């Protein structure tokens, strides 16, 4: 920052504190540079002198009012010739004057002769003080303030031109955007000095012959968050200005700038009504029509900018006029704008809701089948109202997306090979080379991703972040080994890796760091890709922790039930995390957690089913039903447990679908898909072993066909597919166990059965056609 702008910034801090607290701190307290202290004190003294002059004029009396029906005479000003009355704005009347000494045309703003306005003299004086501080080409310049005049008058720059609202319809969209960008820059200058306009509207913006804007009428300017309510022009008031209990800050001007842009591109204000109460109610509701619905030619980027600036909640608007100006600059440069209006989410959600309700109604009255309703709901879920456009576009299979994620995958593969070369083959030693191969790229990718994210290349940034996450764990493992941190001898008991290449503690710390890093990035970018990586790393961290409790011995001894029981807490933890995030609107993060909960649930129950452990834990057994010829004593317990799991998966999926949210829908669909295959898996295994009667093959075939038929009752495509797949497998086992591959009769029987099924289908269809 140069000396001039630094002094302006510090002066603005002094002024803001003075306007807010009525207290003037020593200038030396705001700068540590002694060379600036004197200059800052000089500027402060000039401001205080101006403030004192203005305050001394606050008791000035006005001229007498004209009688009704009279045309008031033009006022006279010493040293000037009054040419004409230009108009009125806020609390003052504006006249065109000729400066007799300097032979130039100027404007004079005086307090209106209306006695009711007299009480607003402080606002008029505030405007004089505010304008005197400005030196910006887009804000009218103040030449003189006459405090001793009756009433007080400001002599200021005369702007030859037209009001913005009158000229805008004849301008191109790019010209309108360029004008408003300049206005935003000027308003930011006022905000930097602690002054807010609070009455921005097209009538207060003049355009000269070069279409350069000049902002007028700072009569309501202030910095006090408690002032400015219910004052100004109604159509341009922010919602918080309609509520005296809500504070006002610079984002109130941002709102007005958004309304101005909306009006510039559509030709109408966003809210209209038969009365002021109707307009105020519409402003409070905050749901204007989309500009493209009024004027189809409106560039979508300008629609975004206007709606973001006009957001109902100040927190959803641009944080400053500067940010709005930058987005307008992006539009003018042909770049993507950053704005994603909150109204897009609410409007899309409001318009999608009736469609979803219609889908439910169609399913209720049997116009569509349940599986069709599920598929339609899934299609609408892709229009997630909480996701940014760049996230939706990043899902497209463009060449850029293919290249980005292929690059991230190749980096992961390369880092794995490099780690293997270092730890398994001792081909790489020391920390220097691994740092340049893995560590430095990790730092560079994250720095580049951070810069790209700020430059609106967000899809590219996410790919860079993913690539960086893939490098981090392997570099940390190499660094731990080379520095001797948590390195253990190869024969240390209880380690997951018995060769000593990686200790449990190294694995835990490495995965935990990568997990926390990916989680923070997921929250920052709001992307499903990074939240999925976080979910996976969280599960790997849980397994690494279980290494200290005997994970390796459980796997070696085949005690999968112990593994399942220790993994079981992960299921509710994932579900609880998904529920909490879903409640706060972070569906993109909740969805992977719910899916992980479903996958963990399936894994736990299937691990418990192995070796009949589930029945053993429950204290029951089906061994007495097992054939004496079967060598595995727990085979029937194992298979029965798998079948019960399939039924349980279906039951849980039904409950989740019935009582869950959009975020839980993918998990429910996963369980619905797994359930029929899990039910048929045990009988398929019995048929494959051929240790029971060969009649089992026919039982398997019958169950497979039954599952396919059940799909009609449940309207689940997963049941139909599971039935068809298992029917094919059953037919294969029947032919294999009976050595019918060389029997044409078997093939002919299947052909005949197929023809019979086709004829049956025709007859059923004909019957259905005859029914009313």
Image: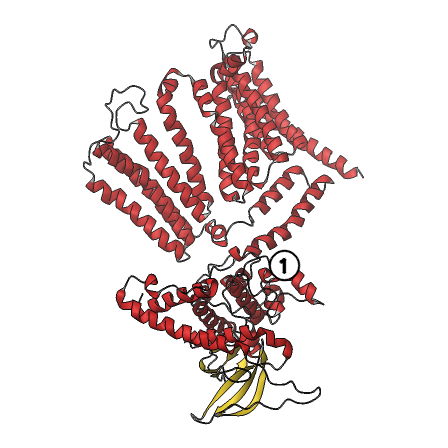
Q: Position of residue 54 (x, y in %)?
A: 48, 76
**Nearer to us in this view, 17 or 214:** 17
The mark tally for this picture is: 1
The residue sitting at 38% across, 20% down in the picture is 555
Quarter of the image for the C terminus: give it: top right
| Between 640 and 454, the one nearer to me in the picture | 454
Q: Is residue 185 above or below residue 532?
A: below
Q: Position of residue 639 (x, y in %)?
A: 53, 17
Instruction: Using residue 549 as the reference point, say whether residue 718 is left or right of it.
Output: right
Q: Is residue 744 visible?
A: no
Q: Residue at x 39, y 27 (%)?
A: 543
Residue denoted by label 1: 284
Image coordinates for residue 243, horizontal then vertical, percent: 61, 59
SS category of the residue bearing label 1: helix
Q: Is residue 22 above or below residue 482?
A: below
Residue 623 appears in view: yes
Q: In the rendered image of this protein, does residue 161 appear above or below residue 277?
A: below
The N terminus - image quarter = bottom left
Identify the residue at horizontal 54%, vertical 34% (top origin).
670
**Which residue does the image show at 26% across and 24% down from the upper left?**
499
Residue 496 lies, in percent from the top left, at: 33, 24
Q: Nearer the viewer, residue 303 or 677?
A: 303
Q: Quadrant of residue 168?
A: bottom right
Q: Nearer the viewer, residue 493 or 622?
A: 493
Q: How is the image coloured?
A: secondary structure
């Amino acid at each position: 920052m140069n000396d001039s702008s630094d002094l302006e910034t510090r002066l603005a801090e002094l002024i803001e504190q003075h306007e807010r607290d009525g207290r003037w701190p020593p200038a030396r307290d705001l700068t540590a540079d002694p060379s600036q202290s004197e200059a800052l004190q000089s500027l402060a003294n000039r401001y205080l002198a101006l403030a004192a002059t203005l305050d001394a004029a606050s008791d000035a009396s006005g001229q007498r009012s004209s009688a009704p029906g009279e045309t008031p005479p033009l006022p006279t000003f010493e040293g000037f010739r009054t040419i004409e009355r230009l108009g009125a704005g806020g609390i003052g009347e504006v006249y065109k004057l000729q400066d007799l000494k300097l032979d130039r045309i100027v404007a004079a703003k005086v307090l209106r002769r209306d006695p009711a306005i007299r009480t607003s003299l402080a606002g008029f004086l505030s405007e004089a003080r505010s304008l005197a501080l400005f030196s910006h080409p887009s804000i009218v310049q103040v030449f003189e303030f006459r405090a001793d005049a009756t009433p007080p008058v400001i002599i200021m720059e005369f702007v030859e031109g037209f009001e913005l609202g009158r000229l805008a319809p004849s301008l191109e969209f790019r010209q309108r955007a360029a004008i408003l960008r300049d206005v935003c820059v000027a308003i930011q200058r006022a905000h930097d000095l602690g002054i807010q306009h609070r009455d921005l509207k097209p009538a207060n913006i003049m355009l000269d012959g070069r279409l350069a804007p000049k902002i007028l009428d700072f009569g309501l300017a202030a910095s006090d968050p408690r002032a400015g309510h219910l004052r100004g022009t109604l159509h341009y008031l922010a919602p918080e200005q309609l509520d005296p209990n809500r504070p006002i800050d610079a984002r109130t001007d941002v709102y007005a700038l958004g309304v101005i842009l909306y009006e510039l591109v559509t030709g109408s204000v966003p809210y209209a009504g038969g009365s002021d109460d109707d307009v105020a109610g519409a402003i409070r509701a905050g749901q204007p029509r989309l500009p493209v619905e009024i004027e189809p030619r409106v560039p979508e980027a300008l629609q975004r900018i206007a709606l973001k600036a006009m957001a109902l909640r100040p927190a959803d608007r641009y944080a400053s006029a500067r940010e709005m100006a930058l987005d307008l600059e992006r539009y003018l440069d042909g770049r993507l704008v950053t704005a994603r209006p909150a109204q897009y989410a609410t409007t899309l959600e409001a318009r999608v809701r009736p469609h979803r309700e219609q889908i439910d109604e169609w399913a209720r009255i049997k116009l569509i089948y349940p599986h069709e309703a599920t598929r339609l709901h899934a299609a609408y879920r892709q229009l997630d109202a909480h996701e940014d456009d760049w996230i939706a576009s990043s899902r497209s299979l463009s060449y850029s997306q293919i290249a980005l994620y292929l690059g991230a995958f190749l980096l992961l593969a390369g880092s794995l090979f490099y780690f293997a070369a270092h730890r398994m083959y001792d081909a790489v030693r020391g920390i220097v080379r691994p740092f340049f191969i893995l560590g430095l790229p990790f730092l560079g990718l994250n720095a580049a991703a951070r810069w790209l994210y700020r430059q609106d290349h967000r899809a590219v940034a996410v790919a860079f972040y993913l690539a960086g996450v893939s490098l981090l764990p392997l570099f940390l493992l190499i660094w731990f080994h080379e520095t001797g941190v948590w390195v253990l001898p190869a024969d240390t008991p209880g380690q997951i890796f018995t060769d000593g290449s990686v200790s449990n503690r190294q694995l835990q710390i490495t995965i935990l760091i990568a997990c926390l890093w990916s989680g923070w990035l997921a929250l920052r970018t709001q992307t499903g890709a990074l939240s999925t990586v976080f979910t996976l790393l969280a599960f790997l961290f849980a397994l690494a922790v279980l290494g200290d409790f005997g994970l390796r011995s459980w796997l070696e001894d085949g005690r999968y039930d112990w593994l399942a029981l220790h993994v079981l807490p992960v299921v509710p933890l994932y579900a609880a995390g998904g529920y909490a995030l879903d409640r706060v609107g972070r569906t993109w993060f909740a969805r992977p957690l719910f899916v992980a909960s479903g996958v963990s649930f399936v894994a736990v129950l299937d691990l418990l089913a192995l070796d009949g452990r589930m029945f053993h834990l429950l204290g029951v057994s089906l061994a007495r039903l097992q054939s004496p010829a079967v060598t595995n004593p727990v085979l029937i317990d194992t298979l029965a447990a798998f079948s019960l799991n399939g039924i349980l998966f279906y039951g849980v999926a039904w409950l989740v679908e019935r009582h869950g949210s959009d975020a839980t829908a993918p998990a429910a669909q996963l369980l619905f898909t797994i359930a029929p295959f899990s039910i048929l898996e045990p009988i398929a295994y019995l048929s494959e072993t051929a240790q029971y009667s060969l009649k089992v093959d026919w039982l398997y075939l019958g169950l497979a066909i039954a599952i396919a038929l059940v799909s009609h009752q449940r309207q689940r495509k997963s049941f139909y597919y599971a039935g068809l797949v298992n029917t094919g497998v059953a037919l294969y086992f029947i032919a294999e166990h009976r050595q019918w591959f060389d029997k044409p009769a078997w093939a002919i029987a299947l052909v005949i059965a197929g023809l019979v099924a086709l004829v049956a289908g025709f007859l059923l269809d004909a019957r259905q056609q005859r029914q009313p």
